[in-house]
Image (cartoon, rainbow, N blue to C red):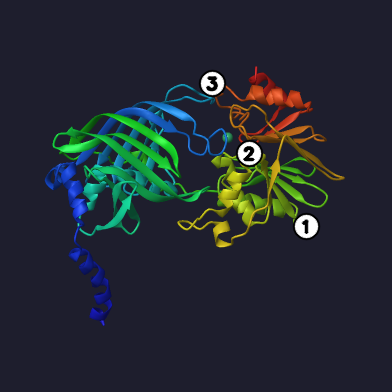
């Protein structure tokens, strides 16, 4: 009985041991400096400068992303364990509340992903961050090839693409990569892996490597550029590659070693006017508006968990009425992450005309890595374009949707105006700081919002901000001066 159970388990191990490494992999090992030099390396610290880009936060869908200039990169990797620490000093080169240099520090230690705040306080990140960090860990030729030298790795030749040889490297059931090799030099030119993105589903994460230079007996790239779903997210020029031969201490900070914080979804409701509810309780709020025959939800943010909870709350507040519309203020991923969930619940999406093609694509993308609600129950979307103005009106309610022309935040922003209640619902144009918190250095989008309200002749008393809280319009007027 025992032997019968064990036998099937032993077969895959036997195959793995017997597997031959493709000659191409050995060519790459030789080109990088040879197996013994690679094995002797225990750590890699990369220093340089470059650019980061704000994924999912472009001026409109499909255009290049807002840029941060990185004045200092320092990335240290333990080549003997899944541990790294990534530090950058960067400055936003786009319109945002703070254009002061910011220090970003994060890392991975096994299954502990963490971040370190500018004040030095470390905190463990939610578990969903770990798979992405794990991929980033291996997106360097020295890290991936050294790991691939270990027993049990599956390496297969996978043809050629765009003038490069392609190898498929499987370090473990959850760590799979494509390694592209230059046909002339056999040096790694790209590493690719598949990653899950809430908005875009299964996407390719790719890093390209070039301008190799000697570092001791190893050849290492001095230019690296990463894309996600085809959009450039990081570019670095390496000024120094430091290869260590001694152990490096990249253990997670003590404060980050407790249990990972559990993601929570908390939806509160507050009736701002009869039939108008503020659905808050997290970082991204929504507003529910009741009409005679139906309900309209303004904003379906973040992800399935948030948006499905907000939709459930809406149906709980007015059980008898169909929830018909979901207004999307703009295409930024934190605000659009629940659009697929809204489609899965049969809501009609209202968004600026500049976003319609983007959401058609979002609705049909493949989500096999983490099937979301729409992937589990596919449904074709109904998307209605909002141009400069669109009015929804019946006997009890009027909601006017307006395009916010000339917003320095995004060109596809819409706001909702409730003329009877003299209320405006807006996202990102003005994020009220918490009452007891120091305000940000500036409110760079407030002026445009005030100008929009004046241009349209809207009579606004209160503003329901989709981050923060409800504030009098006078507060935004003041911030916009
Ligand atoms: Zn935004």
Q: Quadrant of residue 154?
A: bottom left
Q: Secondary structure at mark 2?
A: helix
User: Residue 310: horizontal and vertical position, in percent?
Assistant: 64, 49
Label 3, label 1: how far apart the Cα atoms are: 46 Å
Front residue of this view, candidates 22 and 349: 22
Label 3, label 2: how far apart the Cα atoms are: 31 Å
Q: Are marks 3 and 2 in contact (CB under 8 Å)?
A: no
**Figure quadrant, ligand 1:** top right
Q: Quadrant of the C terminus?
A: top right
Residue beneath the point at 23% across and 32% down:
241
Give the residue at mark 3: 441
| Image vertical order of residue 188 relative to residue 1, above or below | above
Q: Secondary structure at mark 1?
A: loop
Q: Is mark 3 within 8 Å of ligand 1?
A: no
Front residue of this view, candidates 441 and 29: 29
Of badges 1 and 2, the one in the foreground is 2
User: Residue 422: horizontal and vertical position, in percent?
Assistant: 79, 32
Give the residue at mark 2: 354
Residue 320's disc number? 1
First of labels 1, 2 by sequence position: 1
First of labels 3, 2 by sequence position: 2
Q: How crowded is the residue under tag 3: few (<14 C-alpha within 10 Å), some, or many (20+)?
A: few
């Amino acid at each position: 009985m025992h032997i019968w159970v064990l036998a099937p388990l032993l077969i895959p191990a036997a195959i793995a041991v017997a597997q031959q490494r493709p000659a191409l992999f050995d060519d790459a090992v030789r080109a990088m400096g040879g197996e013994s030099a690679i094995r002797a390396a225990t750590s890699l610290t990369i220093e340089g400068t470059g650019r980061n880009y704000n994924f999912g936060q472009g001026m409109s869908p499909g255009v290049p992303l807002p840029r941060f200039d990185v004045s200092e990169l320092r990335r240290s990797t333990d080549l003997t364990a899944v541990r790294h620490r990534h530090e950058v000093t960067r400055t936003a080169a786009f319109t945002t509340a703070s254009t002061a240099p910011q220090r970003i520090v994060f890392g991975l230690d096994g299954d502990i992903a963490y971040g370190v705040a500018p004040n030095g306080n470390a905190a463990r990140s939610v578990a969903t961050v770990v798979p992405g960090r794990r991929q980033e860990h291996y997106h360097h030729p020295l890290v991936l090839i050294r790991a691939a030298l270990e027993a049990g790795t599956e390496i297969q030749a996978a043809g050629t693409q765009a003038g490069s040889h392609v190898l498929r490297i499987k370090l473990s059931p959850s760590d799979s990569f494509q390694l592209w090799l230059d046909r002339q030099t056999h040096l790694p030119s790209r590493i690719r892996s598949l990653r899950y993105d809430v908005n875009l589903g299964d996407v390719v994460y790719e890093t390209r490597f070039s301008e190799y230079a000697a570092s001791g007996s190893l050849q290492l790239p001095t230019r690296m550029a990463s894309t996600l779903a085809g959009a450039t997210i990081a570019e670095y020029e390496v000024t120094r590659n430091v290869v260590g031969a001694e152990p490096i201490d990249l253990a997670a900070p003590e404060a980050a070693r407790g249990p990972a914080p559990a993601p929570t979804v908390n939806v509160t409701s507050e009736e701002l006017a009869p039939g108008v509810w503020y659905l808050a309780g997290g970082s991204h709020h929504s507003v529910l508006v009741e009409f005679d025959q139906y309900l309209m939800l303004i904003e379906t943010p973040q992800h399935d968990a948030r948006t499905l909870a907000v939709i459930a709350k809406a149906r709980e507040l007015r059980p008898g009425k169909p929830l018909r519309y979901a207004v999307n203020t703009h295409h930024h991923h934190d605000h659009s992450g629940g659009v697929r969930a809204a489609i899965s619940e049969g809501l009609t999406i209202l968004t600026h005309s500049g976003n319609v093609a983007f959401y058609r694509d979002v609705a049909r993308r493949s989500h096999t890595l983490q099937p979301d609600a729409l992937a589990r129950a596919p449904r074709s979307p109904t998307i209605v374009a909002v141009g400069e103005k669109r009015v929804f009106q019946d006997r009890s309610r009027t909601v006017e949707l307006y395009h916010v022309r000339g917003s320095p935040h995004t060109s596809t922003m819409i706001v909702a105006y409730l003329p009877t209640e003299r209320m405006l619902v807006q996202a990102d144009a003005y994020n009220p700081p918490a009452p007891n918190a120091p305000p940000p250095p500036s409110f760079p989008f407030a002026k445009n919002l005030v100008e929009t309200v004046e241009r349209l002749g809207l009579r606004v008393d209160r503003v329901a901000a989709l981050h923060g809280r409800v504030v009098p319009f006078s507060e935004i007027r003041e911030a916009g001066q």
